[in-house]
Image: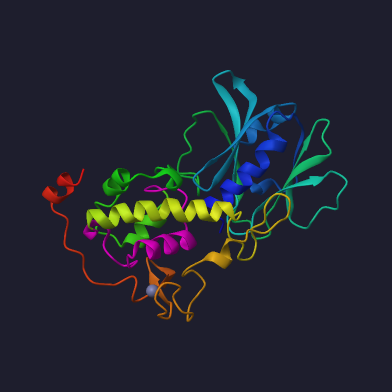
Amino acid sequence: MPELPEVETIVRDLAGPLTGATIDRFDLRRRDVLRAGADRLPSLHGARITSVAREGKRIVIATDAGRGANDTTRIVVHLGMSGRLSMAPAAARLEPHTHLIVSLRGRVAELRFRDPRRFGGIWLFGTGEGTGQLPYVGALGPDALTISTRTLRGIFQSGRQIKAVLLDQQRIAGLGNIYADEALFRAGIHPVTPASQLTPASVAALARAIRAVLEAALRFGGTTLIDYRRPDGQAGSYAAHHRVYGREGKPCRRCGTRIVRMLAAGRSSHVCPSCQSKRKWPRMTRAVRDGSR
Ligand SMILES: [Zn+2]
């Protein structure tokens, strides 16, 4: 599933061709791909796209269509497992499982959404409209790309495994299995460590590691495992730089120990048993926490 760097790469690639363009047709070829907001569909014809942005792992295309100045329609796309957004010449052959075509007035290229496995989808929302409890569209925590040590410290009060907390989009938005594993490795933290038992130094190291790994992945256009492609069809090339994810049985790039794959937070997790020691961290006391601010 695409994570923050992949979605951010797509958003940056789409912002140029889409921002300022006028929607000629919003051609929904498979109705059940639209998960919410069908009543807003007619207003999209002739609407101007005002911005393309990312919220967590969602892509948000804002338009000037809607029910008034304070209620404009936002097209929210979640890529799920196999969803793909591409810019393609209108004359180009349609790939199978193309569920949405957005043609743009006076433009050669159109926006296409395809999703063979259909875990992704499209939601139409008004500005500030409650996104409720729909899959993938619930409340989001602070964005992982800009998360601070202080914010993380607040999130890590829980006794849950650190890996589970990092994957919880309501706590911290944008991380998935790949970048959670990579960040934990860089910070030297074992994924089953209870979040509340991390020392202030470890929390600070993890905040730095999260930002560093996401920024590095962005420089390479993200990670392509199977399905993810940039809007122009290019794959992301960050997988070659992974330190643990997908490297089971291979030597750790730091110490040479074999990387193991284990279950943490119900997910397959990649760990260097020597760089990410499993020893219990001393429980943070209030005095230590306050003293470190
Ligand atoms: Zn190691």
- Residue at the spot x=33%, y=70% of the render? 276
Residue 201 lies left or right of residue 219; in this view the side is: left
- Asked if residue 6 shows in the view, the reply is yes
- Asked if residue 35 shows in the view, the reply is no
Residue 229 lies left or right of residue 177; in this view the side is: right
> Is 45 above or below relative to 213?
above
- Residue at the spot x=21%, y=68% of the render? 280
| Residue 115 percent coordinates (x, y) | 67, 55
| 190 or 171, nearer to the observer | 190
The quadrant where ligand 1 appears is: bottom left
- Residue at the spot x=31%, y=47% of the render? 149
Query: How is the model colour-coded?
Result: rainbow
Q: Which residues are magenta?
A: 170-198
> Is 274 above or below relative to 266?
below
Q: Which residue lies most toward the top here?
A: 69
> Is 242 above or below relative to 120?
below
Q: Quadrant of the C terminus?
A: top left
Q: Which residue lies most toward the left here?
A: 287
| Residue 57 percent coordinates (x, y) | 52, 48
- Residue at the spot x=33%, y=65% of the render? 188
| 278 or 258, nearer to the observer | 258
| Residue 32 percent coordinates (x, y) | 65, 48
| 162 or 121, nearer to the observer | 162
Q: Quadrant of the N terminus?
A: bottom right
> Is 23 above or below relative to 210?
above
Residue 174 magenta-drawn?
A: yes
